[in-house]
Image: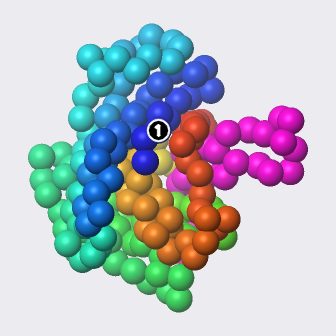
C-alpha cells in the first residue's frame, strides 16, 4: 500500500510507503509532512516517521510501532461483532471502533451516540467521467489524533483487503485523499 494523503489544496500531509510486500510479512511506514508547502511534493526530506506497521500474514504476530513503543496488533486491537470490527483505545482511554462495512471503513467513538471520527469514501463508479478519488475524511472530533487515525486506518484497510474474497471486493486506496473537516 503506497499512497499519499493530501488535503483539499493537494498538499501532501501523510505518505504510506510499503517497499517490500513479502510473502509472509509486509512493512508499511507512515510519515507526516514537516513542510507547509502547497502542491504535491514527495521529497522524503520533508517528512518525519509517525509509525510503522509490520503485518505478518498470521496477524497474531503483526505489530504497530507508534510513539517509540511497539504494540502487538492482537493486543492493540480487539475484534468485536460478527464482522470482527476493530476496537482500540485512544487518547484519554477513550475507545474507538473501525467498522468494516461493504467497501467502506468508518471510525466511530465507542459510545452511545457512536460519534463519527473518520470515514473512508471509496472511488465512485457511478460517473466514470467525473470519478472522484477515494478519500479518508477526518471529522473535527478526530483532529487531536490524526496520526493515530492514519496508522490504525492502514491496519484496518489491510484487514479489510485480506477479508475480500475476490478482486472486485477489494478497495483501491492508492489515490486516497485526506480531508480534515472542521
Q: Is residue 34 left or right of residue 158?
A: left
Q: Quadrant of the C terminus?
A: top right
- Residue underneath mark 1: 3
Nearest the camera: 57 or 71?
57
Q: Position of residue 117 (x, y in %)?
A: 53, 54
Picture residue at 29% right of the left edge, 21% below the top: 44
Nearest the camera: 135 or 158?
158
Q: Position of residue 28 (x, y in %)?
A: 31, 48
Nearest the camera: 40 or 164?
164
Residue that extends furthest to the front in the rendered view of this protein:
23
Q: Is residue 71 above or below residue 28?
A: below
Total labels drawn: 1
Q: Is residue 173 left or right of residue 24?
A: right
Picture residue at 32% right of the left edge, 53% below the top: 21
Magenta region, residue range: 109-138
Q: Is residue 45 above or below residue 172?
A: above
* Displayed quadrant of residue 165: bottom right
Q: Secondary structure at mark 1?
A: strand
Judging from the image, the colouring scheme is rainbow
Residue 4 falls inside the magenta stretch: no
Assess disc 1: are there few (<14), some (14-19) or many (≥20) residues with their C-alpha within 10 Å of its C-alpha: some
Q: Position of residue 123 (x, y in %)?
A: 70, 48
Amino acid at each position: 500500500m503506497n499512497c499519499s494523503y493530501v488535503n483539499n489544496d493537494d498538499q501532501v500531509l501523510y505518505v504510506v510507503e510499503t517497499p517490500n510486500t513479502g510473502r509472509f510479512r509486509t512493512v508499511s511506514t507512515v510519515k507526516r509532512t514537516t513542510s507547509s508547502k502547497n502542491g504535491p511534493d514527495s521529497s522524503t526530506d520533508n517528512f518525519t516517521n509517525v509509525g510503522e506497521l509490520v503485518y505478518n500474514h498470521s496477524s497474531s504476530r503483526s505489530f504497530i510501532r507508534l510513539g517509540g513503543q511497539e504494540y502487538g496488533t492482537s493486543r492493540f486491537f480487539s475484534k468485536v461483532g460478527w464482522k470482527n470490527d476493530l476496537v482500540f483505545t485512544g487518547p484519554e482511554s477513550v475507545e474507538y471502533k473501525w467498522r468494516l462495512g461493504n467497501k467502506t471503513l468508518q471510525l466511530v467513538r465507542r459510545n452511545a451516540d457512536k460519534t463519527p471520527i473518520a470515514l473512508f469514501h471509496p472511488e465512485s463508479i457511478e460517473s466514470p467521467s467525473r470519478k472522484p478519488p477515494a478519500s479518508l475524511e477526518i471529522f473535527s472530533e478526530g483532529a487531536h489524533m490524526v496520526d493515530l487515525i492514519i496508522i490504525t486506518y492502514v491496519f484496518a484497510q489491510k484487514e479489510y483487503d485480506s477479508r475480500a474474497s475476490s478482486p472486485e471486493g477489494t478497495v483501491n486506496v492508492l489515490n486516497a485523499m485526506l480531508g480534515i473537516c472542521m
